[in-house]
Image (cartoon, rainbow, N blue to C red):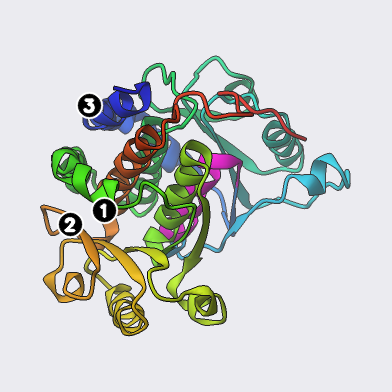
Amino acid sequence: MSIMMREIAEQPKALERTLRAEKAHMLRVAARLQKHDIRLIVLVARGTSDNAALFGRYLLEMTSGVPVSMSAPSIYTIQHRRLNLRNALVIGVSQSGEGPDINTVLESARKGGAQVLAITNHRDSTMAQIAQDTFVTRAGLERSVAATKTYTCQLMIFHMLAAALGNGGFESLHRIPEYAEGALSLRQEMEPLVERYRFMDRCVVVGRGLNYASAYEMALKLMETCYVAAERFSSADFLHGPIAVVQQDFPVILFAPPGLAFHDMKALARKLRSIQADSLIISSEPGILRYAGRAIRIPARVPELYSPIPYIIPGQIFAAMLAALKGLSPDRPRGLKKVTKTL
């Protein structure tokens, strides 16, 4: 078994640890932030952490009513510009906390008057030293280059931040590790399904809303561990042109939890069925699974708000299994290291 697969299985406990350890800290920080006139939230990250930040963007805009922007680090590192970030909350997200470009943005933001937070798996990292407050994901040591448990723990921190800033409680978040455990139970039944994709070398992954980030993250996992050319789209953007690449038997993977985005995903599933695409649908809902060429049925009907963590876990399992079938190591992808430093 790969290290990646073992770390996937550790996620329910890691999520529980993160929630338990950071609750009191999160409430203190949220109380402090509410004394400031926060008019903009800026998220800065790279790689898998950038996908976690994409989830954070949707979640924080939904729950806080404050506009959220994704930072472009090259504005700081290549263009050497300094932005006016007064009344802004800037949040850095990094597994290692050692990305030079991310940390440059945080340093500049703090000098520019922003409130600066960090989300990292390493409390003694450079990022943690720059930020005014640091939330530590309790994922434990992650040895596989392909990040899994650090990603879902970052999502948990964003759930906690959204709840705290919205003056809500954390009670409902305690169901997320349970949902994650249920998703892990799919592993055995996924083995024959993944076999079907042994020779896949390209695909499209689609999600919308909170699971737009899931599409990005699964596509990244397929690219870095299986060397599959995986494009990712929201269902709306996909219909604005890219769907033209789809023909009979072209693989398309859809994330479709119940909720506000479900109607659009179901309409897309119907369209893909009509053109005989090879649709793999991840959902708990029979109403959309009947349009699937193949399905990963999520065992619990998870509310859309909490779906990204239990829905990405089958995507992680799929990538780890497919890499093994292709004779590849998901733990040591070619050309990659655990910590990537860019400017």
Q: Quadrant of residue 147?
A: top left
Task: Look at label 3 and name its amino acid.
Answer: Lys
Q: Which mark is residue 13?
A: 3
Up-down relation of residue 121 to residue 186 (above or below): above
Give the quadrant of residue 261: bottom left
On the rendered structure, is 116 left or right of 215? right
Residue that numbered label 1 is attached to: 306
Q: Which secondary structure lies at badge 2?
A: loop
**Highlighted range, magenta:** 44-60
Q: Residue at the location (59% across, 59% down)?
A: 39
Residue 11's tag is: none
Residue at figure coordinates x 31%, y 76% from the top left: 269
Q: Kindly tell me whether residue 177 is visible in this rendering.
A: yes
Asked whether the beta carbons under mark 2 and mark 1 sit within 8 Å of each other, the answer is: yes
Which sits in the foreground, 3 or 197?
197
The amino acid beneath tag 1 is Tyr
Query: For mark 2, does the 10 Å Cα neighbourhood hold few (<14), some (14 to 19), or many (20 or more) residues?
Result: many
Label 2 to label 1: alpha-carbon separation: 7 Å
The percent coordinates of residue 270 (x first, y second) are: 29, 82
Q: Residue at x 23, y 43 (%)?
A: 170
Tag 1 secondary structure = helix
- Frontmost residue, 84 versus 252: 252
- If the image is split into quadrants, where does the N terminus sit? top left
Q: Is residue 11 above or below residue 242?
A: above
